[in-house]
Image (spheres, rainbow, N blue to C red):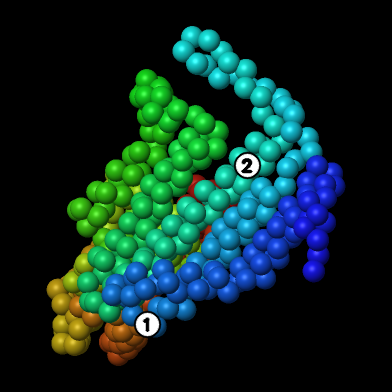
Amino acid sequence: MLDSAFFEQVFWGNTVKAYCLFGGILFVGLIFKRIVSRLLSKLLFKLFKSFSNQSHDEAFVALLVKPIETFILLTTLYLSINQLKHPLEVAIFHYSKLVGKVKEQIPVSIGDCIDRIFLFGIILSTFWIILRIIDFISHVLLYKASLTDNKSDDQLVPFLKELFKTIVIFIGFFTLLGFVFEVNVLTLITGLGIGGIAIALAAKESLENLIGSFTIFLDKPFIVGDLVKVDGVEGTVEKVGFRSTRIRTSEKTMATIPNRGMIDGVLENLSLRNSRKVAFTIGLTYETNAGSVKKIVSEIEDYISNREGTADVSASFKSFGESGLNIEVSYFVVILNNAEFLKIRQEINLEIMDIVMKNKSDFAYPTQRLISDIPLAAHDKEVGNDTTD
């Protein structure tokens, strides 16, 4: 058995006992941090057991293992290092602190710096754990929202997640200022009140976007999953965030529009339409006689009107164009599915081609007559040249 005098021997300002405690705490912490972190994660999950179900157990553990491991590691290092006396217990610098009306010079040692660094890391890891718990709660809520037909909750959950995470980050920031840097938080907040006008002006756009996000949730001009068109951007709403809305365009790109732009501009919610309009003009050659034009217009209107899935059909002889006789056609397709809509429009276009051809007519296209196509005598007469001797 080792003599107790051995443990009382001093090397570099610390006893052998202190070094053993340092190594023991560090060894245990590093070896068991993974096991302890998973165990603590499962214990925390029991607090949310009634809120979620057992299938979310692994998701909760996966989210919390890393921050809890970091917390355990920092705590272990802090406890182990505190078993030693620092050989340089001297002031490495001074900082001034206002006490009443007198500035007091306070020495800061290496030990104080180490304590503050570890306190900073422990507070940071604690708020990291809180943020991961918010992520888990939003994960469960999104799962429950996906089971309902109402899409409003799918939109609300990500927004509340960002809101609460922002609040936690602000609280964590002021906690670090108060405990690590010993800043008087109440005085700081009062000072922010004095400079509130300047801050409000600097954050004007951010505040407008925040107000815009609340307007979107209250007024509900659209929800996640709706097809919208705003400022020339058309696509499906994927997420309404704290500051902006993300839209997946038809080209599969991601467009990010500030929430202020979503409510200030003209927004079309294409998902709320009850039909889709098709309008176009076709040109018939000038060789088509009046009787054929009437018959073509009548047959086009009859065919589209009798076709299933169409409404408000109109076909008429519109005008005399530069290249042909213009027939205006318009109708609505009441089937909103895009694939079905394209199929119906194609079938109608092909039938219009058949109708025009059956009535001994053809489609006009722009033509240009060159001077070389005109007989020489007619050309000379047009330009006023006398071809007689």
Identify which amino acid the numbered label 1 is placed on. Answer: Gln
Question: Crowdedness of circle 1 by 10 Å Cα count: few (<14), some, many (20+)?
Answer: few
Secondary structure beneath dot 1 equals: helix
Q: Which disc number belongs to residue 54?
A: 1
Where is residue 357 shown, x and y percent of the image? 33, 87
Identify which amino acid the numbered label 2 is placed on. Answer: Asp
Where is residue 361 shown, x and y percent of the image? 32, 82
Which of 178/212 is in front? 178
Which of 18/243 is in front? 18
Which residue is outermost to the top?
101
Query: Which quadrant does the N terminus fall into?
Result: bottom right
Secondary structure beneath dot 2 equals: helix
The quadrant where residue 2 appears? bottom right
Where is residue 221 shown, x and y percent of the image? 23, 57
Where is residue 179 shown, x and y percent of the image? 50, 38
Circle nearer the N terminus (1, 2) = 1
Which of 124/28 is in front? 28
Q: Is residue 336 above or below residue 16?
A: below
Q: In front of the other: label 1 or label 2? A: 2
Instruction: Give the residue pinned by disc 2.
Output: 115
Q: Which disc number belongs to residue 136?
A: none
Q: Residue at x 62, y 47 (%)?
A: 118
How far apart are the two marked residues, 1 and 2, measured between alpha carbons?
40 Å
Q: Are marks 1 and 2 in contact (CB under 8 Å)?
A: no
Q: Residue at x 49, y 54 (%)?
A: 126
The quadrant where residue 304 appears? bottom left
| Residue 266 visible (yes or no) | no
| Residue 89 visible (yes or no) | yes
Q: Residue at x 67, y 54 (%)?
A: 80
Q: Is residue 221 above or below residue 248?
A: above
The answer to whether 282 appears left or right of 38 in the picture is: left
